[in-house]
Image: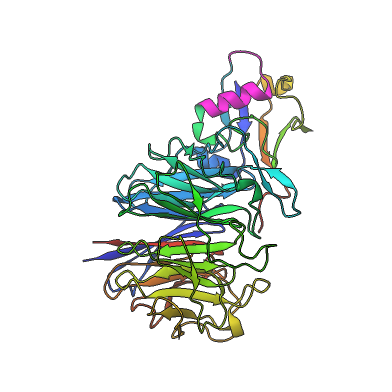
Amino acid sequence: MIRVLLPTHLRKLAQVDGEVRVDLAGRATQRSVLDALEASYPMLRGTIRDQSTFQRRAFIRFFACEQDLSNESPDTPVPEAVASGSEPFMVVGAMAGGMRD
Amino acid sequence: MSRVRVLVGTHKGAFVITADGKRQKWDVSGPHFAGWEVYHVKASPADPNRLYASQNTGWFGQLIQRSDDGGKTWAPVGNQFAYEGEAGTHLWYDGTPRPFEFKRIWHLEPSLDHPDTVYAGAEDAALFRTSDGGKTWQELSGLRRHPTAPHWAPGAGGMCLHTILLDASHPGRILVAISAAGAFRSDDAGTTWRPINRGLKSEGIPDPHAEVGHCVHRIAMHPSRPDVLFMQKHWDVMRSDDGGDSWREVSGNLPSDFGFPIDVHPHEPDTIYVVPIKSDSEHVPPDARLRVYRSRTGGNEWEPLTRGLPQENCYVNVLRDAMAVDSLDPHGIYFGTTGGQVYGSADAGDTWAPIVRDLPKVLSVEVQTLR
């Protein structure tokens, strides 16, 4: 079981409060976590990564265990603490950019 | 009794504003999708409870929302807008080629007779269509594959396909407008296209009379007389009497012929409305006075409509999709400003009052007449 923490806008879109929990059959990587997340919450497709290329959107970051995992390969295993469910995988809207206010 | 429902897209969410046929007392619902840019909300002419909204942020990209109950509840539908085949290139601001890349949906145009069919105008300029209520979207790629597309260039707001007109009396006819490419028409339901810009003159491009490259801001049509088109261009208000095959200027006595929206009276096809803006470098009303101009002669002769609108210290703009007319008699007209006011008139523009104030920057206004 993986714990995923979504930014406010995506929690509202997915109609969830707090953390989301997803179950993985195989190895926990960024890709498999996001695949499982989007399978459970199809309305999130395209909001975190491109639906065709699966590239992370420019103003989305991935944090876990006080590390920035955004530029890791999608197939790199997530930290053990995330895989074991003791720490959340955090999807974060970048602090700067994204919208003209 | 008749009612009206005004659909407002703003920089920070959507609002649904309703009133009875007197249009004096307004009920405001929203924000829906708070914090997201909502470029456009529009209802199906075939099912007034079916609404579609374009929702976007730079962080999370494009969503399309659909309501089946007149805007009370919404659910996201499909949001994959994939250009068909090779993307191709257009011109960038510096004149270099740049691949087409999807950024957002500017305009949603539901089909005249099928609630599940909707056309969507994209930035970078492309036309998409759904026929399953928004679950899936397919590009009508003949437009983007037009031989002139490599010469299209973005306007200041991006290279957006912002106007889609469907013509019930010419089956298969679709007109679109792109900033800054110009107007295009298909007579075979979007398979093939041709530019319809003859008569337009734009000083900001190397050849002022070029086939493409014109910054068309908006085109309006009366459904009873679809061959007559009215255009607000970057500069110039234009008219066509032959479905866009040729255009002539009808700016006449306007204080400025720069502006964004243009609309047509629902019962008088020769009565049209524009909101003049000072210039392309100052997007504010001339003399800081917010005035709608009405022509009852299909252009050239214009009268200012000012009663109830701010006539001093006004520095707002009215964007291209932010004006709409209802079809009651006398008809109502509505427009939203970049300052967050939505003004309404229940007497064809003679008098105005804000139906809501202090919203976020208004990006679009549509209205439904519910009988």
Q: Is residue B190 left or right of residue B195?
A: left
Relative vertical location of residue B217 with respect to residue A45 in this rendering, above or below: below
Relative vertical location of residue A14 with respect to residue B276 in this rendering, above or below: above
Residue B200: x %, y % from top left? 55, 66
**Nearer to me, B206 or B369:** B206
Residue A46: x %, y % from top left? 57, 36
Which secondary structure is most common in the magenta stretch? helix
Residue at image point 45% right, 45% down: B65
Residue at image point 41% right, 79% down: B295
Location of the C terminus of chain A (image quadrant): bottom right
- Total labels drawn: 0
Residue at image point 44% right, 83% down: B301
Q: Tell me, yes or no, whether the highlighted magenta stretch contains residue B9.
A: no
Tell me the magenta residue range. A25-39
**Nearer to me, B292 or B255:** B255
Relative vertical location of residue B237 with respect to residue B140 in this rendering, above or below: below
Residue A65: x %, y % from top left? 75, 29
**Nearer to me, B76 or B29:** B76
**Nearer to me, B240 or B341:** B240
Q: How is the image coloured?
A: rainbow
Location of the N terminus of chain A (image quadrant): top right
Is residue B136 among what the camera can see? yes
Residue A88 falls in which quadrant of the image? top right
